[in-house]
Amino acid sequence: MNPIAGMGGSVGLKGTDGPETLKQAIELGAKPRAPERAKQFLFQIIKSKASIELYTCAGTMGEDEARSCGIEPQLVLGERKPTTQHEDTKLLTRKLAKNDIDLLVFCGGDGTARDIADAVDGKLTVLGIPAGVKVYSAVLELTLWLVQP
């Protein structure tokens, strides 16, 4: 999960790409949106009574949301960081690609989708939960088709 996806759009910016844009978004009063979207997805999984194993990162890249929904995740990257970068998304995705997972679900925007598409290199089926502001570019839809094995 990209914890800052969509913050820029809520205050009239075109995304939250880069530390300066994130800083500007926060100064304009932006609040994180992606965590709530991730939790909505997880609650639907719980409601369906599907049996899942959830692999994620420590802290704001998925662990916090999973635990708040009553799911005990397996941590692929266990270091809790105060801020995350696109390199963290790529590292997590590459580690997940080495595991035998059925589906990679991410919550983010176009930048997150691009990072994941680059990192999976066609080795995983990916599902995106839109949380960004620039999803009109159809990167999330295209990502589903481009990265299916």
Image (cartoon, grey):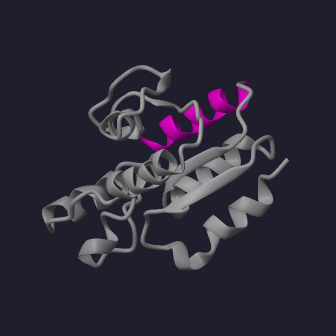
Horizontally, is 119 left or right of 106 in the view?
A: right
Residue 84 visible within the image: no
Q: In the depicted view, which residue is nearer to us: 112 or 56?
A: 56
Q: Position of residue 3 (x, y in %)?
A: 36, 48
Residue positioned most to the right? 149
Horizontally, is 68 left or right of 53 in the view?
A: left
Q: Residue at x 59, y 48 (%)?
A: 105
Q: Residue at x 74, y 27 (%)?
A: 100
Q: In the depicted view, which residue is nearer to us: 27 or 92?
A: 92
By secondary structure, the bulk of the magenta-drawn segment is best described as helix
Residue 85 inside the magenta-drawn segment: yes
* Magenta-colored span: 84-98
In which quadrant of the rendered view does residue 145 lie?
bottom right
Q: Position of residue 40 (x, y in %)?
A: 40, 56
Q: Residue at x 42, y 41 (%)?
A: 85
In which quadrant of the rendered view does residue 146 lie?
bottom right
Q: Is residue 80 above or below residue 47?
A: above
Horizontally, is 36 left or right of 146 in the view?
A: left
Residue 9 inside the magenta-drawn segment: no
Q: Position of residue 14 (x, y in %)?
A: 39, 74
Q: Position of residue 143 (x, y in %)?
A: 70, 60
